[in-house]
Amino acid sequence: MGNSSVRWINILFVLAALSGVGVFLVAIGSLVKLVIISALLAYILDPLASFLESRWMGRTAATSVIFIGITGIGALFLFLAVPLLAREIGSLQDMVSSGRANAMITRFESFLQGKLSFLGIQDLDLVAKVHTRMSDTMNWLVSHVFDVVSLLTDLIIVPFIVFFLLKDGRAFKKHLINSLPNRHFEFALNLLYKMEVQLGNYLRGQFLDAIVVGILSTIALRILGIEYYFVFGALAGLANLVPYLGPVAGASLTIIVSLFKTGDIAMAPYIALAFILVKLIDDALIQPLIVAKSVDMHPLVVLLAVIIGGKFFGILGMLLSVPAAGFLKVAIQEGMANYRKYAGRISTQNTL
Amino acid sequence: MDSIWGNIFKPFKKEDDDEIRTILKKIPVFKDLDNRELARVERILHRRTYHPSEIIFSQGDPGFGMYIIESGIVSIVLMPSEHRLAELSEGEFFGELTLLDESPRTASAISRTACKMLCFFQPDLFDLINRDPRLGVKIMFGLARTIGARLKYTNECINALKDLPAVSGAS
């Protein structure tokens, strides 16, 4: 059998093995999702554990201290922020269920009919349309609430996995590397390290960025006197994790709700301006300081990643799509660069 | 079950730990380290076994770390002339320059006999420096001293070559 036939058989074998792994991962999809979330959280927390280790603490002790700290912060959040969030969400629901929103829509409809009658706009029936859309959204939310319920159950599993990944991650990685053949293990070790550095920096940067944007948005909305400033500030921070679409969605939602609440369009430009200012501060000051630029991707790639992530895994997929795409990008980039070095060396040897 | 988990999660056995520590103590890079620090280094080492005539790395490969010979004999060969630069055995090490940068390997390393190697890599060194800067400084100082000694030896060789009649006459 010729060399090229052996090579093709090898390639086919690798492809078949990869397909098998893919099918298996899809079959245990929910578990894979949990492991991915845990791994990402472990990446975010890893420097903190290393920092504590550098202060003469063992890895287990460092991991335990981090978990005690997170539990404390979580308890504080439950104690302070959740009642405020619940009150604001309840107030929002009251506003939607009262007739004020309908009145506002009807007023907007008659405004459209009055001003744009020359376009043939007559029977818009916006109230019914908005209600249908809201009922669709509610159905979607209810179907995802089950996701949230299972997520609550998973909240026990995720910290468990994160704890062990954080404590023993280095040993897991070492065993993985040790299982590779001699010829490839040095290259694989370096590739893994580079991907870790880039992905870790990116994730930690995004996480910090989301917190800072959330706090800035909350302050801006509070200054403007927007009623649900805390909910929308927190949402803006969270939405910031989804590039391009997130900030626009956060601002639009705040403007629409404020419009329904007050019935006054005058506030809209101020809210938009506040979000633009926060975005400018984010782009000019926060991003360059804390978000690693190394995983920079073309906006089109980012958008496609977000859409694909959302299509397959919902909101979680949208949040995780960019780091996942970044991980792939670094893997391909580093893999290709090192492959070229190896290939260059092999071809030089062959010609000598 | 116990043995499976033992195999998966236990890097080295106890007797191997002592053996490795004895080897590490002889390496100039780790000369200043106490037992606790040597134990930390041990945990990040990778242990590999090679068959006779197996290529450990080839000249021109991107390099990411140093190899310490636990047992066996390794030849350092310059390609394409296949000129043998050195033959190293137990307790000796090579490739330490790539701990400082990712330069290509300047020669090939081939196992002459069955070999057991301890591998110390740049990513693991960087991680160790982050977690224990004091230990990191000690290792880096040891590394600088080793490279300095090699540079001194190279200078001596160059001077000796200059003193040879043919070279002096040509110049």
Image (cartoon, rainbow, N blue to C red):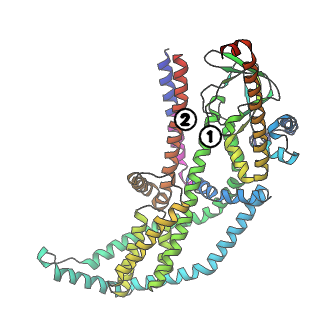
Amino acid carrying mark 2 in the image: Asn
Q: Quadrant of residue A191?
A: top right
Amino acid carrying mark 1 in the image: Asn
Q: CA distance from mark 2 to mark 1?
A: 10 Å
Q: Quadrant of residue A66?
A: bottom right
* Neighbour tally class for label 2: few under 14, some 14-19, many 20 plus, Cα within 10 Å: some
Counting from the top left corner in percent of width and height, residue A215 is at 53, 74
Relative to residue A44, is residue B44 depicted above or below?
above
From the image, tell me which residue sits under label 1. Answer: A190
Left-right relation of B10 to A218: right
Bounds of the magenta segment: A16-31
Taking depth in this image into account, of A125 and B66 the one nearest to the observer is B66
Relative to residue A330, is residue A181 depicted above or below?
above
> Residue placed at 65% from the left, 37% from the top?
B64
Counting from the top left corner in percent of width and height, residue A288 is at 51, 61
State the quadrant of the C terminus of chain A. Answer: top right
From the image, tell me which residue sits under label 2. Answer: A338
